[in-house]
């Protein structure tokens, strides 16, 4: 019967808002027709401007408060049940119903296991605030290539009185490098593109001028980005065979190939290219465990550009007076990389869909996750920043809300467990279970199994039982608390909507888990 009454409440509260809106716009239209403010105060009629402000303030009231007021009005007036078709005579008093059926939060806040989080613990370094973007992407596959080296140049000095001067062709510039840098202010990889290529080096020029080096490419990613090489595509450079890669002046290729000194140069270049290839293999080696950009810092070199080719001035000798050849630049390094973002939150919220994680995060932080009564409401991780009284904490801390986990997530059911990467770095885990479930203890056991011992070891744990304001939850919470006591984990019942003393104690416990609570 109570559920039917609440259904009437929603209809009446909606009608109340619509009626208030009509009165508001009626007053507003009257003021516009009058062309200005009303006469001096003291008249018989109420000041329309004050009336307008009054209705505007009422419309801005919270819907939950308006619904509660309407509920009390209905139960107090007890309208005729013959007109409404409902019998309100047997509806119990709300205050009495609340006191006898829902969780007694104050009693359970004295859980001794909470004390370890309500006192100061090990400190953690301060960190700046990150802002969430409108779009989110935590995995990105990017093809990268550093710049090719510029080719050498074939040129001879031409000056007055010197019709046939010595060779003066310069070397080509080195190709641009590819760097990656972790910066604050980014929280997603969605700004990356599928492919990046650094600039090539410029070819050499006459008068012994070297070509300009290619411009380096710097990719800025969020802090917490983890980079690995795609195992299907190995890092490689596209170069000519050892001893090859020559540039000849027009019409002189056959002439040069017939000369003995050129064949000796090719043999010498074979050894040089082989040595350069060994150097490049050593420099191009990528760490097997990847690159972890867990903090801000200077740019990190990913791919080094190719070395520039040699100009013809490099081959001038007593045996070779007029070298009409140069060498091409070395190819740039290219490969496919996997960028994986692991958010650096101090604490992580873990729970089933619709367990109340997003509502809890909204209640305790500045994050605004999407909330609704359907499965997988949260489709991307959110990070909320929590700032408490500076007299109690040394710094703010962050909490990550990841999409809900279901039974069989490790088998890629539902959203899978791909988002669990965002809590792997966290110092503590907060398991959120809803008291509207038939067996919250069984839900907690499933969450523990899906995460696995590897993700649980070495982390602080806290169980938060949400929706403690629902009826018939006292017995359910007592069974859950008995299960968590056996695990040695503290538990706390809260109502994120009402924001009472339970939320304040939860915030203090979370600050202790994050290591920011003052001594």
Image (spheres, grey):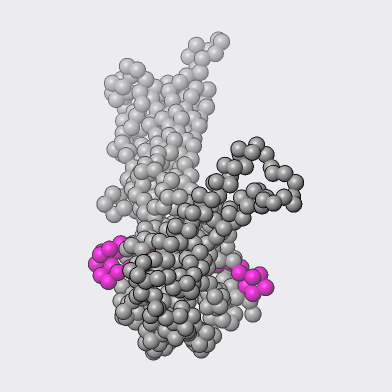
| Residue drawn at the location 56% of the way across and 10% of the way down | 160
Q: Is residue 465 visible?
A: no
Identify whether 325 is placed above or below 183. above
Residue 179 horizontal/vertical position (percent):
47, 47
Q: Any magenta on residue 191?
A: no
Residue 22 at least partly seen:
yes
Provide the residue span drawn in magenta: 388-416
Q: Is residue 54 left or right of residue 459?
A: right
Which of the two residues, 141 or 379, is positioned nearer the viewer here?
379
Front residue (pair 259, 248): 248
**Up-down: is 501 above or below 29?**
below
Q: Nearer the viewer, residue 4 or 109?
A: 4
Is residue 401 found inside the magenta-colored segment of the image? yes
Give x and y (percent) for residue 55.
58, 54
Q: Position of residue 404 (x, y in %)?
A: 35, 66
Q: Residue at x 44, y 86 (%)?
A: 100
Residue 301: % across, % down: 46, 49
């Amino acid at each position: 019967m109570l559920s039917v009454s609440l259904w009437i409440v929603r209809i009446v509260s909606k009608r109340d808002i619509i009626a208030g809106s009509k009165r508001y716009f009626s007053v507003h239209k009257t003021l516009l027709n009058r062309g200005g403010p009303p006469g001096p105060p003291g008249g018989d009629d109420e000041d329309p401007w004050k009336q307008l402000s009054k209705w505007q303030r009422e419309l801005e009231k919270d819907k939950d408060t308006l619904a509660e007021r309407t509920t009390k009005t209905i139960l107090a007036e007890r309208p005729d049940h013959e007109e409404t078709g409902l019998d309100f005579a047997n509806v119990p008093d709300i205050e009495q119903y609340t006191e006898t059926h829902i969780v007694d939060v104050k009693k359970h806040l004295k859980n001794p296991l909470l004390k370890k989080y309500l006192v100061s613990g090990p400190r953690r370094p301060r960190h700046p605030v990150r802002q969430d973007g409108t779009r989110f992407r935590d995995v990105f596959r990017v093809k990268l290539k550093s710049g090719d080296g510029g080719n050498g140049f074939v040129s001879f000095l031409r000056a007055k009185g010197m019709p046939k001067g010595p060779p003066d062709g310069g070397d080509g510039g080195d190709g641009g490098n590819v760097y990656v840098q972790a910066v604050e202010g980014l929280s997603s990889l969605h700004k990356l593109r599928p492919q990046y290529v650094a600039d090539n080096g410029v070819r050499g020029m006459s008068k012994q001028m070297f070509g300009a080096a290619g411009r380096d490419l710097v990719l800025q990613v969020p802090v917490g980005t983890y980079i690995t090489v795609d195992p299907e595509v190995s890092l490689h450079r596209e170069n000519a065979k050892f001893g090859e890669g020559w540039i000849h002046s027009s019409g002189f290729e056959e002439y040069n190939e017939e000369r003995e000194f050129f064949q000796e140069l090719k043999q010498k270049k074979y050894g040089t290219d082989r040595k350069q290839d060994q150097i490049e293999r050593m420099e191009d080696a990528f760490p097997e465990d990847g690159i972890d950009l867990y903090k801000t810092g200077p740019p990190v070199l990913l791919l080094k550009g190719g070395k520039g080719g040699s100009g013809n001035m490099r081959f001038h000798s007593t045996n070779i007076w007029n070298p009409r050849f140069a060498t091409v630049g070395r190819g740039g390094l290219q490969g496919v990389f996997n960028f994986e973002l692991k958010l650096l939150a101090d604490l992580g919220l873990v729970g089933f869909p619709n367990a109340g994680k997003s509502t809890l995060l909204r209640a305790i932080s500045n994050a605004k996750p999407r909330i609704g009564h359907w499965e997988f409401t949260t489709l991307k991780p959110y990070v909320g920043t929590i700032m408490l009284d500076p007299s109690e904490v040394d710094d703010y801390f962050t909490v990550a809300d990841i999409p809900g986990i279901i039974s069989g997530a490790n088998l890629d059911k539902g959203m899978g467990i791909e988002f669990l990467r965002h809590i792997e770095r966290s110092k503590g885990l907060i398991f959120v279970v809803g008291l509207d479930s038939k067996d919250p203890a069984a839900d907690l056991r499933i969450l523990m199994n899906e995460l696995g011992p590897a993700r649980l070891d070495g982390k602080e744990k806290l169980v938060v039982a949400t929706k403690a304001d629902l009826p018939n939850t006292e017995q359910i919470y007592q069974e859950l608390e008995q299960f968590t006591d056996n695990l040695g984990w503290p538990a706390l019942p809260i109502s994120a909507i009402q924001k009472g003393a339970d939320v304040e104690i939860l915030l203090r416990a979370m600050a202790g888990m994050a290591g920011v609570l003052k001594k």
